[in-house]
Image (cartoon, grey):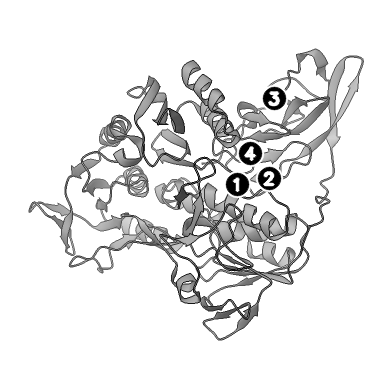
Amino acid sequence: MAGEDKAPSGPDLEGGVPEEELVEGRPLVGHVKDEAVLLVRVGKDVLAAGAVCTHYGGPLGEGLVVGGTVRCPWHHARFDLRTGEAVGGPALNPIACWQVERANGRVSVAGKREAAPPSRAPARAPSSVVIVGGGPAGAACAEALRRAGYAGAVTLVAPEPPGPVDRPNLSKDYLAGTAPEEWIPLRAPEFYAEQRIDFVASDPAARLDLAAHTVTLGSGRALPYGALVLATGAEPRRLSIPGADRPHVRLLRTLEDSRAIIARASAVSRAVVVGASFIGLEAAAALRHRALDVDVVGPEPVPLARVLGEEIGREVQRLHEEHGVRFHLGRTPREIRDDDVGLDDGMRLPAGVVVVGVGVVPRTELAEAAGLRVDNGIVVDASLRTSAPDVYAVGDVARFPDPRTGAPVRIEHFVVAERQGQAAARSILGLGGGYREAPFFWSQHYDVTLRYVGHAARWDRIDIRGSVAARDFAGFYVDQGRVAAVVTAGRDLVALQAERALEAGDAAALEALRQAT
């Protein structure tokens, strides 16, 4: 949810501050007239930039400075303090940069600097780039290609209307009615025209010819490519029980899905959510905000325990129960009728709308038919290259080597998808780096937001710092003596510090953080 407008705080930076007050890497928040501005010492330089994240309005002054970048404490967007560029998702738009003057032991901020396009020259430039899939990974890749200076043809095949959207919001604020629909598209249609990105809607890819370097669309149109990016995403699992195809039974993946649930929720009073997943529980919270009675059905004894562990999972359950949600755990649905859902124990739950959140399956059909290597996703290397030359895969469909362990993983996070799209653009243009980000996601439940960095498929123990019951804690997932992931509530800076340490492979820093938190 976007930050609220607030009166400027901190010193008037036009008047300046003593330079001795600036500590390396620690942002000082002030203002220039009515705009919040960060002042940051980075080495010998003092830099000034906008203090509000362009994603949801997070306070960058409460974030973390890493090198010449600042990271947002809310959703871990990253900005270059020298150029203002959004260099890491989920933010796409830059922050402003300001002129800094230093004289007589004081530092002051003058006017804004004109934004200049990054002066980059790709090391290599394919004849054209075709991106199949209009989710966050594909959209971020297209934008990153242009920002990196690629001047060739870029085609984004985005058959799902209205094109790239802010998917996390579909189960959070938008579904709850606290975010307007104009927030949902990642870009207006004019943006793609301005960036010379050929946006192909309502015409999905039907076939790949890797030898001929072409993508054939459903209409028969053939798109030649020098580089191909597969960002086909994942398909929600459907229930295979009687009544699962009734019109009031909805998946939650697209803007159309969310709209349909909202329309139905406005006309009924009871909802059943099938699946105690992150998506399912976020939907439950959103529907409670709309004053519906909500029942959640799931086969597991503790919701989210597979990802978060039992203690934290039980606290998430208690949080929902405090808001009136009823849980039916260890249960599965057997039948859906017009006005209720029948469970395997014979109980019938009244339901005017049923929301299904039971996981997704990667969309690999095109890749398999083309002969690419597929194993629970399209297999890629650290540069996101597939088993075929000039073909890359990103986002929910990609199975990539974990940068910290080397084990193949497929991770279904919005931020991961965007950052992989950006990394694929670098790989295509020979700018190096590959994908070495620490996975990150956030999950919103009423007034509590969980932030999770890293990836722990298993763990030997979870070291809790703080109080889970007070919903103010950091949980460190330790696998064979190594911190593999960290989850926090109410400790945003710890999440950012853990992310930095994970990406640097700094086990000592992680251990120090675990001890100090």
Neighbourhood count class around disc 4 (C-alpha, 10 Å): few under 14, some 14–19, many 20 upward: many
Residue 322 on image: x %, y %: 27, 32
Judge from the rendering whether residue 255 lies leftward or rightward of residue 264; answer left or right.
Answer: right
Residue 446 on image: x %, y %: 38, 37
In the image as oriented, which residue stretches furthest toward the left?
346
Residue 421 on image: x %, y %: 60, 56
How far apart are labels 3 and 1 at the CA level? 21 Å
Q: Amino acid at mark 2?
A: Ala
Q: Amino acid at mark 1?
A: Gly
Neighbourhood count class around disc 2 (C-alpha, 10 Å): few under 14, some 14–19, many 20 upward: many
Q: Amino acid at mark 3?
A: Pro
How far apart are labels 1 and 4 at the CA level? 11 Å
Which residue was labeled with disc 1? 89
Mark 1 or mark 4, earlier in chain? 4
Q: Amino acid at mark 4?
A: Cys
How far apart are labels 2 and 1 at the CA level? 7 Å
Which residue was labeled with disc 4? 53
In the image as oriented, which residue stretches furthest toward the right?
104
- Please report the residue visible at 47 percent of the width from the left and 17 percent of the height from the top: 515
Q: Secondary structure at mark 4?
A: loop
Q: Secondary structure at mark 1?
A: loop
How far apart are labels 2 and 3 at the CA level? 18 Å
